[in-house]
């Protein structure tokens, strides 16, 4: 029997993820959005696409959260994008209210669900999800590290003119500007990247990776990235459904690991059908430790704002 996966938000990321998931045949999907007709229309379009491919998967669009009851995996993509003139605190408060409100209603109906959080600021929204749901920490996971690693891998592949399949990268820390790419764990067919590229070129690639989302926004003007985020989320879902025990960089609740406590941040984990099964702790250099600490403090500062405002 296929798993039931709920996707909250039928925007670009949510709808693209629904397409990838339905076409894989791994799960049946319930696509939720508050805009009437939006999830229903996109779900019908995706369903018709399965007939072309000859795939038997089901997808259902709804505006009613009760239809998500019994979902085994819940993906949260819903939230506001930052608008011109909007303060970071305003965006933080608005998305915490959206995510927290949804999770509060869903938690009793999906008591054993694994949550994958995509909504930004992702690390903080994952913290909100854990606090409101009352789930075990292993069952709340933020998507960010896979996307950041894929961007780093893409830019290295372009620079060297090689297949990204032969590149291994690892990115720790918060999603976005506070990510911590680990150059010494980055290889091309086993060859350390610093043996192939000069330091200055690697630093430029890291900078472009950190600004990867902003680069896409500047080109699209009215939208942000969604194909790569959706594919990254799909990789997490596949690892969970198939119990693949994949080692993937994800944002998880840290309780002393990497010297961090009561915060979400990106670290390598083993992902299986129970959520994240183990955090892999690496011995970091002093420079890497400092960068990771800076990333952690940035997330903590936003969590503190939400606590002061009574949002969590």
Image (cartoon, rainbow, N blue to C red):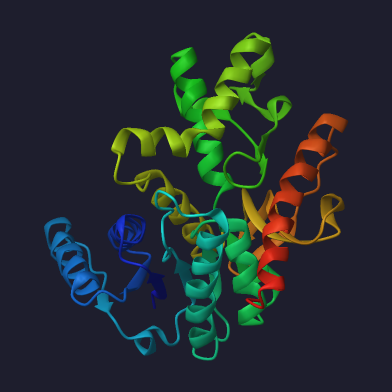
Kindly identify the residue that appears in the image at 62 percent across and 61 percent down.
Answer: 124
The image quadrant of residue 260 is bottom right
Q: Is residue 9 visible?
A: yes
The image quadrant where one finds the C terminus is bottom right
Instruction: Find residue 117 and report its horizontal and vertical position in percent.
Output: 53, 63
How many numbered marks are there?
0
Instruction: Find residue 264 and report its horizontal and vertical position in percent.
Output: 70, 59
Residues 13 and 165: in front is 13
Position above or below: 208 against 265: above
Q: Is residue 247 visible?
A: no
Instruction: Find residue 144 and report its horizontal and vertical position in percent.
Output: 55, 49
The image quadrant of residue 194 is top right
Kindly identify the residue that appears in the image at 72 percent across and 56 percent down.
Answer: 301
Position above or below: 249 against 116: above
Q: Is residue 256 left or right of residue 214?
A: right
As drawn, the residue found furthest toward the front would be 85
The image quadrant where one finds the N terminus is bottom left
Q: Is residue 208 left or right of residue 249?
A: left
Kindly identify the residue that appears in the image at 45 percent across and 37 percent down.
Answer: 214
Instruction: Find residue 136 and report its horizontal and vertical position in percent.
Output: 69, 76
Position above or below: 57 against 226: below
Q: Is residue 298 left or right of residue 204?
A: right
Q: Is residue 175 left or right of residue 12?
A: right
């Amino acid at each position: 029997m296929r798993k039931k996966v709920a996707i909250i938000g039928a925007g670009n990321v949510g709808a693209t993820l629904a397409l990838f998931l339905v076409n894989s045949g791994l799960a049946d999907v319930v696509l939720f959005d508050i805009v009437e007709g939006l999830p229903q229309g996109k779900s019908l379009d995706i369903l018709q696409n399965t007939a072309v491919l000859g795939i038997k998967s089901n997808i259902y669009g709804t505006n009613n959260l009760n239809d998500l009851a019994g979902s085994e995996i819940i993906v949260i993509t819903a939230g506001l994008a930052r608008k011109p003139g909007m303060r970071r605190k305003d965006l933080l408060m608005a998305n915490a209210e959206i995510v927290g409100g949804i999770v509060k209603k869903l938690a009793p109906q999906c008591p054993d669900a694994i949550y994958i959080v995509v909504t930004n600021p992702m690390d903080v929204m994952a913290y909100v999800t854990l606090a409101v749901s009352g789930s075990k920490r292993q069952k709340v996971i933020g998507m960010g590290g896979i996307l950041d690693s894929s961007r780093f891998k893409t830019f290295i592949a372009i620079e060297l003119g090689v297949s990204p399949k032969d590149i291994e990268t690892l990115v720790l820390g918060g999603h976005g500007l506070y990510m911590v790419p680990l150059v010494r764990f980055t290889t091309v067919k086993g060859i350390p990247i610093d043996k192939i590229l000069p330091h200055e070129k690697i630093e430029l690639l890291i900078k472009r990776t950190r600004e990867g989302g902003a680069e896409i926004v500047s080109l699209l003007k009215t939208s942000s990235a969604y194909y790569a985020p959706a594919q990254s989320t799909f990789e997490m879902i596949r690892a969970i459904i198939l119990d693949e025990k994949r080692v993937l960089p994800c944002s998880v609740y840290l309780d002393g690991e990497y010297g961090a406590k009561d915060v979400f941040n990106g670290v390598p984990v083993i992902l299986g059908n129970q959520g994240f099964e183990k955090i892999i702790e690496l011995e970091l250099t002093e420079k890497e430790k400092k960068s990771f600490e800076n990333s952690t403090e940035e997330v903590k500062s936003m969590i503190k704002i939400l606590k002061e405002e009574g949002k969590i």
